[in-house]
Amino acid sequence: MIKIFEPVELGSLKLSNRVFMAPMTRSRADNSNAVVTERHAKYYSQRASAGLIISEGTSVSKRSVGYVNVPGIYSENQTEAWKQVTRAVHDKGGHIFVQFWHVGRISHPDLLNGKLPLAPSAINPNKNVRTYNGRLKSVTPKEITVDEIKQTVNEFKQAALNAIEAGFDGVEIHASNGYLFHQFFNNVSNKRTDEYGGSNENKSRFLFEVIDALKDIIPENKIGIRLNPMMHGASGIWVDEQTADTFDYIVNKLNDYDTAYLHLTRPAKIIDEPYFIKDVISHYRNIYKGILVANGNYDLESAEKEIASQHADAVAFGVPFIANPDLVNRFRNGYPLAEADKNTFYTSGDKGYIDYPNFEDQ
Ligand SMILES: Cc1cc2nc3c(=O)[nH]c(=O)nc-3n(C[C@H](O)[C@H](O)[C@H](O)COP(=O)(O)O)c2cc1C
């Protein structure tokens, strides 16, 4: 049991271990400007011993928001506020990427000043959305025009400028879990007949346009990409005969770039179809030549195995980091893990956020 505690290089960054913290929305930016606060700085600094922290999904624009109390990185105020977070993590010797989030159709006019959510096609994902007026049914989104796609690419570009200003070590593009990029990749959510629909090249065009735009702002090796290729039956995304081929295409094309990493989530639900990739990590390890980060219901033993077998270079842990700010130390010493309280995942305040103690301080 040693590999997971070995350092790993991510571009020019030297990370002290391979236990990464997965991005997690915690809905604590409960203020009108969607800015992070001292409380966020404390939360992230408590977890700074992770090899890399990937921040909660962070809105790249006003139109990209899909959940309550999510912080943004599109305004000056927000950018300024993030500085206290990056500083607090760096002061403890940690590293932090910001996760760029555009939810596409997983939103509601109540979160968008009355505007319709944007999506590749006008297809309702039939999902409940958490708004300030409680859980509401999603609506049929507006089919995004090519001009709006270009504008959205520019929003990512501005967010990258802000991320540098805020002191982040890099950015992760949230191209998974049924949000805007994933909506372009999937045949059920993308029925376009223009250059953004149909072929693999077209369905992934928006992703590569965003990567190309970010490259002008931030070194390629500070850009990570998150995918959940076999997500099925959630947020209106369904795997079909073409899905694996589309993701094979995307991952192959990522090999043409010198990005920081590819972050893959294993499917929560496995279906017994010949076209379904059951072992996403080893499948894409065979294709992807860069740093691969695995995620999805790992414990120390399974994570160590994934790294020792060279299927992954690092493993990102989500829920375990909520109740165990000192997860790395607990793993190292074989200390027991505390259990996270699901009721406080998305609530306000300190409870269930910054009040989980380190094992050695108990
Ligand atoms: C409370 C919570 C919030 C999450 N928010 C995000 C998010 O903002 N962005 C994202 O890509 N994934 C998000 N996820 C998914 C996690 O990053 C991760 O993929 C998932 O929890 C599985 O990993 P785990 O088994 O180690 O927890 C969230 C998960 C949880 C539990």
Image (tube, helix red, strand yellow):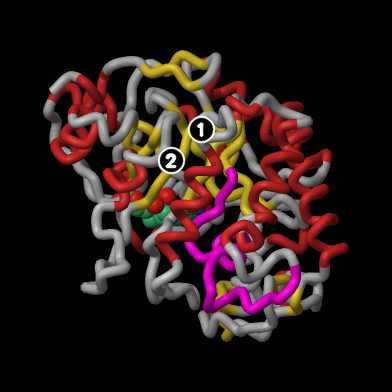
Q: Nearer the viewer, residue 199 or 357?
A: 199
Residue 354's disc number? 2
Query: What residue sits right under mark 1 in the picture?
Result: 42
Q: Are marks 1 and 2 in contact (CB under 8 Å)?
A: yes
Q: Quadrant of residue 314?
A: top left
Please give left or right for residue 179 compared with residue 302 in the image: right
Report the Cα–Cα distance between label 1 and label 2: 7 Å
Q: Assign the C terminus to one quadrant of the image.
A: top left
Question: With respect to residue 277, does 209 lie above or below?
Answer: above
Residue beneath the point at 57% across and 85% down: 137
Q: Secondary structure at mark 1?
A: helix
- The location of residue 22, given as percent across then percent down, is 42, 42
Residue beneath the point at 53% across and 74% down: 187
Asked if residue 146 lies in the magenta stretch, the reply is no
Circle 2 crowding by C-alpha within 10 Å: few under 14, some 14–19, many from 20? many
Residue beneath the point at 43% across and 56% down: 228
